[in-house]
Amino acid sequence: MQALLVGGDYVEPLIGTLKARGFERVHHWDGRKQGDTRKLLPQDVSLVVVLTDYTSHPLLEHLRSQARRRGITVVYSRRSLVEVRQRLDAQELRAA
């Protein structure tokens, strides 16, 4: 299973958290490039984690619509390791 982390710069601890939950690969988009609003979600992604402090509204809408069409779970959080863990725990999200 793969996850996509959108937003933020120093995301290694967040990637480590996702890998500890069983996600083999974690993609990262910084969310600052104009072209990010045209990117397609990677094929094998089953979870999208959006760090809302670092993303624009058009990017959020683009991600949300793609995820909704493909049935992918989206978790929204501020850039806080503790908050990301709490959000994932609340939904009991682990790779299958």
Image: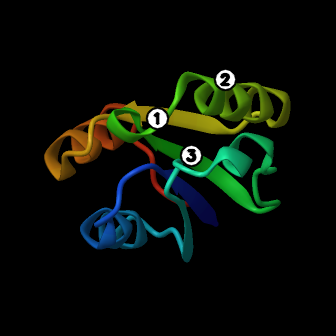
Q: Earlier in the sequence, mark 1 or mark 2?
A: 2
Q: Earlier in the sequence, mark 3 or mark 1?
A: 3
Left or right: where does residue 42 sit relative to residue 57? right
In the image, taking residue 96 as reference, residue 70 lies left or right, namely right
Q: Residues within 10 Å of mark 3 (few under 14, many from 20)?
A: many
Decide which of tag 3 and tag 2 comes sooner along the chain. 3
**How many residues crowd around disc 1 within 10 Å: few (fewer than 14), some, or many (20 or more)?**
some
Q: In the rendered picture of this protein, how many numbered marks are placed on residues?
A: 3
Amino acid bearing label 3: Val
Assess disc 2: are there few (<14), some (14-19) or many (≥20) residues with their C-alpha within 10 Å of its C-alpha: few
The quadrant the N terminus occupies is bottom right
Which one is nearer the viewer's eye here, 79 or 59?
59
Residue 45 image position (x, y, % from top left): 69, 57
Disc number at residue 83? none
> Which residue matches tag 2?
61
Q: Which mark is residue 75?
A: 1
Say which residue label 3 marks. 48
CB atoms at circles 3 and 1 under 8 Å apart? yes
The amino acid beneath tag 1 is Val
